Image (cartoon, rainbow, N blue to C red):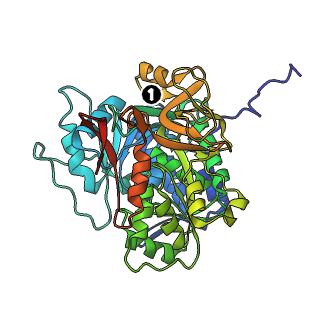
């Protein structure tokens, strides 16, 4: 069989962008995006994305250039997940909670050619651009404005509008028949996402078309997402491109319910009004949903995927009592989504509620897209004992691991070595093969010579329903070395 080789017929580049074309064909008259009083169909969303991609190209943006977006979860933010890479550019969604200095740093580091900015964040962006060193090129600006939003005032240092166009002008002037093409190579970069930078300077994580295709299909399979779900955007799309669900919901012809700002009573109203079936969010989202006064159980179950810090058992129990079906996963910006999930075994349904919550708080086993997941001794690289108590570092190997960090070969080499991606997360492996995150390696508290998990202390605090959010950090102690300090 040695004569059988890859050909254009069997080796077309993988990319999630084609999911939008298919959605327009199969689900063209079905709702794609709902936001306040506006509803688009998949045919309309498809045309709008093509128009914006055309307009981006007309501004001189070329293949491989970075186009940044600073926006909450509104229709434009969703559309740009397709329109930017359809133009050949690399999409960089920026955390809306960052300060002026950090936004300026990211725009310079990424060498963004174009920046789409929501009207509520325009002042922040203009201040960020004024921090650019002299003679440093700045990106062109496009304003995303709601219909009733007032026009932003000119910056104090400028007499004219800094924006070259509004988003809707880009839609109107673009070509609805724009012929986008797949990348020449599926390994070409498609997105750039900056890590939070909570423990160091933000790192630019680069993902390719192939990896994003794999993680998208992986996410749909692992969560068993059906055709035409109604997905509520409680997870910020700037977080690892919404864990790949902008592309995934297109693949299954679902409805995206957008919301500008998380507010628990509003979320309950949207769930009931639109028949929401799926949503994602960090454990703090679960906690906020359970702390709404006089909240009534949902009429129909809502699937909710959570990740990030392990959800405390008390929060899981309260959430499920309201009618949410909680799934738990684990991933990083560097994996573009969740690559470990707590695959539920039918026999566990017969266990007491407290035991079910304890099992569900574990991160679980590798999803189908990952070749290998393990917990290893960071010094030797050997797997730790599967005893549920031996600490080690989580390592990955699979098709959706990032290409690397932008302009940071040393950082890339330090975490991608010996055929593995080293996450920096500390975990244990249980005898049944399920892993459980205990901490970030830099957050482990060493007290009296013992390693203490800040996550476990936080879980105890969450058992008190009066606690909405908890964080445990170490503080110096003359006797113990380091001691727990609750926030």
Left or right, 29 with reference to 75: right
Residue 311: tell me if it is visible. Answer: yes
Q: Is residue 27 above or below residue 106?
A: below
Front residue of this view, candidates 339 and 476:
476
Q: Is residue 240 above or below residue 296?
A: above
Task: Tell me where residue 388 appears, x and y as whole percent.
Answer: 59, 41
Q: Is residue 337 above or below residue 229?
A: above
Q: Residue at position x 17%, y 37% from top?
A: 130
Q: Residue at position x 77%, y 26% from top?
A: 6
Q: Residue at position x 49%, y 27% from top?
A: 404
Task: Tell me where residue 276 appears, x and y as whole percent.
Answer: 54, 70
Task: Tell me where residue 156 appears, x and y as whole percent.
Answer: 10, 46
Residue annotated with mark 1? 405
Front residue of this view, candidates 413 and 393:
393
Left or right, 247 with reference to 460: right
State the image quarter where residue 1 is shown: top right
Left or right, 224 with reference to 181: right
Residue 175: tell me if it is visible. Answer: no
Task: Tell me where residue 442 appears, x and y as whole percent.
Answer: 38, 33
Disc 1 is placed on an element classified as strand
């Amino acid at each position: 069989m040695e004569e059988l080789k890859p050909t254009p017929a069997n080796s077309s580049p993988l990319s999630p962008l084609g999911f939008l074309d298919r959605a327009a064909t199969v689900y063209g008259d079905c709702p794609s995006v709902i936001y306040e009083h506006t509803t688009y169909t998949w045919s309309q969303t498809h045309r709008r994305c093509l128009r914006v991609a055309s307009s981006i190209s007309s501004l001189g943006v070329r293949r491989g250039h970075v186009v940044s977006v600073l926006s909450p979860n509104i229709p434009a933010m969703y559309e740009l997940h397709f329109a930017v890479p359809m133009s050949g550019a690399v999409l960089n969604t920026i955390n809306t909670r960052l300060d002026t200095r950090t936004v300026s740093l990211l725009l310079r580091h990424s060498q963004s050619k174009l920046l789409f900015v929501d009207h509520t964040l325009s002042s922040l962006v203009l201040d960020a651009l004024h921090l650019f060193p002299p003679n440093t090129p700045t990106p062109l600006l496009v304003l995303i404005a709601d219909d009733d939003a007032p026009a932003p005032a000119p910056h104090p240092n400028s007499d004219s509008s800094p924006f070259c166009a509004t988003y809707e002008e880009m839609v109107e002037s673009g070509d609805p028949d724009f012929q986008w093409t797949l990348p020449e190579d599926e390994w070409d970069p498609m997105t750039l996402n900056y890590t939070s930078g909570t423990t160091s300077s933000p790192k630019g994580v680069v993902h390719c078309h192939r990896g994003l295709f794999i993680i998208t299909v992986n996410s749909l399979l692992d969560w068993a997402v059906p055709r035409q779900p109604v997905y509520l955007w409680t997870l910020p799309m700037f977080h690892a491109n919404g864990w790949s669900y902008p592309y995934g919901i297109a693949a299954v012809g679902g409805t995206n319910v957008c919301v500008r700002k998380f507010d628990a009573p509003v979320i309950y109203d949207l769930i009931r009004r639109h028949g929401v079936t799926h949503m994602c969010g960090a454990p703090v989202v679960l906690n906020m949903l359970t702390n709404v006064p006089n909240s009534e159980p949902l009429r129909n179950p809502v699937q909710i995927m959570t990740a990030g810090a392990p959800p405390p058992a008390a929060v899981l129990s309260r959430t499920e009592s309201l009618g949410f079906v909680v799934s738990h996963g684990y991933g990083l910006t560097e994996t573009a989504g969740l690559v470990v999930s707590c695959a539920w075994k039918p026999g566990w349904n017969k266990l007491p509620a407290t035991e079910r919550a304890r099992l569900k708080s574990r991160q679980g086993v590798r999803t189908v897209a990952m070749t290998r997941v393990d917990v290893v001794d960071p010094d030797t690289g050997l797997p730790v004992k599967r005893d549920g108590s031996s600490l080690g570092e989580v390592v990955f190997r699979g098709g959706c691991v990032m290409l690397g960090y932008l302009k940071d070969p040393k950082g890339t080499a330090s975490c991608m070595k010996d055929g593995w991606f080293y996450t920096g997360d500390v975990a244990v492996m249980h005898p049944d093969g399920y892993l459980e995150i205990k901490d970030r390696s830099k957050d482990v508290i060493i007290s009296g010579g013992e390693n203490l998990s800040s996550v476990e202390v936080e879980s105890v605090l969450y058992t008190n329903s009066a606690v909405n959010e908890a964080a445990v950090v170490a503080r110096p102690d003359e006797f113990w070395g380091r001691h727990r300090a609750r926030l």
